[in-house]
Image (cartoon, helix red, strand yellow):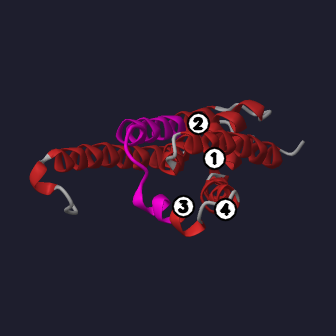
Amino acid sequence: MNIYIEILLVLLAFFFVVFLIGQVKKNNGLVDIAWGLGFVIVGVYSFFVSEFQSERAAVVTILVALWGLRLAYYLFRRNWSKDEDYRYVNMRKRWGTTKSKYVKMFLNVYLLQLILLFIIAQPIITVNKSSEMGLGWLDYIGIAVWIIGYIFEVVGDSQLKAFISKPENKGRLM
């Protein structure tokens, strides 16, 4: 089977499970947690099914996994026990109480994120399928950019957490 179809099927199964969890918890905002994990799934899956498990592919997969797991963990801690985000609450209200609201929610939220994730993850799959083995100077520049971006994300999340934790900031934008 084609690797792209395999990855789409794996992601479909993953997002369907996340959808079921969201319905049980009545919180479709949990799909945000799945975003980072979806990239981890694409990276790890495409790495291990590739016939070329190169140093370059290993570095990309590790960096994607670090980013995706950090994001998923951060969003899990922040959102797991919270009420559903107002955007998803409004969608539920718009779609009413019919059983078709579940189909609409899956298609408009979960499947849309799956498709966007798959498109954005194409470079990961391309690198993991590539027969290019070693790291070149562009790879080292990419690793440096990744490190800087990762630091910015960690610091930004820390600043947001500190801002939100102050009662005088309730309802304000940072």
Determine which residue is flagged by label 4.
104
Residue most extreme to the front: 97
Q: Amino acid at mark 3?
A: Arg
Q: Nearer the viewer, mark 1 or mark 4?
A: 4
In the figure, is residue 59 to the left or right of 16?
left
Q: Is residue 104 above or below residue 61?
A: below
The answer to whether the residue labelled 4 contacts the one labelled 3, judged by CB atoms less than 8 Å apart, is: no
| Viewer-closest of 86 and 59 | 86
Which numbered marker is on residue 61?
2
Label 2 element class = helix
Magenta span: predominant SS is: helix
Q: What x and y, as percent, mark residue 161? A: 23, 44
Q: CA distance from mark 4 to mark 2?
A: 33 Å
Q: What x and y, as percent, mark residue 173? A: 22, 63
Q: Nearer the viewer, mark 3 or mark 1?
A: 3
The answer to whether the residue labelled 1 contacts the one labelled 2, judged by CB atoms less than 8 Å apart, is: yes
First-in-chain label (4 vs 3): 3
Determine which residue is flagged by label 3.
92
The answer to whether the residue labelled 3 contacts the one labelled 1, judged by CB atoms less than 8 Å apart, is: no
Point out the image quarter for the C terminus: bottom left
First-in-chain label (3 vs 1): 3
Residue sitting at x 48%, y 50% = 29
In the figure, is residue 174 to the left or right of 27?
left
Determine which residue is flagged by label 1.
124
Q: Amino acid at mark 1?
A: Ile
Quarter-wise, where is residue 122 in the image? bottom right
User: What segment is highlighted magenta in the picture?
Assistant: 63-90
Q: What x and y, as percent, mark residue 42? A: 66, 41
Q: Tag 3: Cα neighbours inside 10 Å, few (<14), some, or many (≥20)?
A: some
Q: Amino acid at mark 2?
A: Thr
